[in-house]
Image (cartoon, helix red, strand yellow):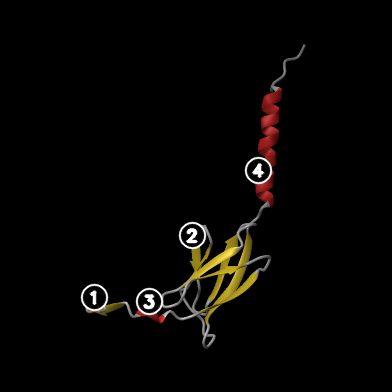
Amino acid sequence: MRKLLYSTGQILLGVVWLALLAGDAWAQDRRVTGRVATFTDNQPVPGATVQVKGAPTGTTTDANGNFAVATRPGSNTLVVSSIGYKTIEVSVGNQTTVNVTLQEDAASLSEVVVTGYSTQQKK
């Protein structure tokens, strides 16, 4: 008689592992592109941070306010922020192009005054 090289448990474990690996391969990243502009005059916001909510990393906009970020299925919210503007969350849904407008946040700009090589709180 011939000996089995693998037990039934090892074969079952291998099949489950391959199924999980294949499922992860089907859940491909999708690329979401767009433009970040000001709310008042639709001017681009260069250097704005665009991040998938809950992700540890993100991207920044170029000089024309354009960005491209990879999202996973189920990651449907982008967090967009920039100094001097209010941080917003934008629902992506099934879109591959998302244009964002940021509103100015004048209160955050008037809190710190830079004087030479040091900083002081505004009183």
Q: Earlier in the sequence, mark 1 or mark 3?
A: 3
Could you tell me the amino acid type at mark 1?
Gln
Secondary structure beneath dot 2 equals loop
Q: Earlier in the sequence, mark 4 or mark 2?
A: 4
Which residue extends farthest bottom? 41
Which residue extends farthest right? 1
The alpha-carbon separation of the residues under discs 4 and 1 comes to 54 Å
Residue 94: quarter of image: bottom right
On residue 108, the disc is 3
The alpha-carbon separation of the residues under discs 2 and 1 comes to 31 Å
Q: Position of residue 50 (x, y in %)?
A: 51, 68
Q: Earlier in the sequence, mark 4 or mark 1?
A: 4
Residue indicated by mark 4: 21
Could you tell me the amino acid type at mark 2?
Thr
Residue indicated by mark 1: 120
Secondary structure beneath dot 4 equals helix
Residue indicated by mark 2: 57
- Give the position of the N terminus as an image quadrant: top right
The alpha-carbon separation of the residues under discs 1 and 3 comes to 14 Å
Q: Nearer the viewer, residue 77 or 3?
A: 77
Q: Residues within 10 Å of mark 1 (few under 14, many from 20)?
A: few
The reply to whether the C-beta atoms of the residues labelled 4 and 3 are less than 8 Å apart is: no
The reply to whether the C-beta atoms of the residues labelled 2 and 3 are less than 8 Å apart is: no
The reply to whether the C-beta atoms of the residues labelled 1 and 3 are less than 8 Å apart is: no
Q: Position of residue 54 (x, y in %)?
A: 52, 57
| Camera-side mark, 2 or 1 | 1
Residue 42: quarter of image: bottom right
The alpha-carbon separation of the residues under discs 4 and 2 comes to 24 Å
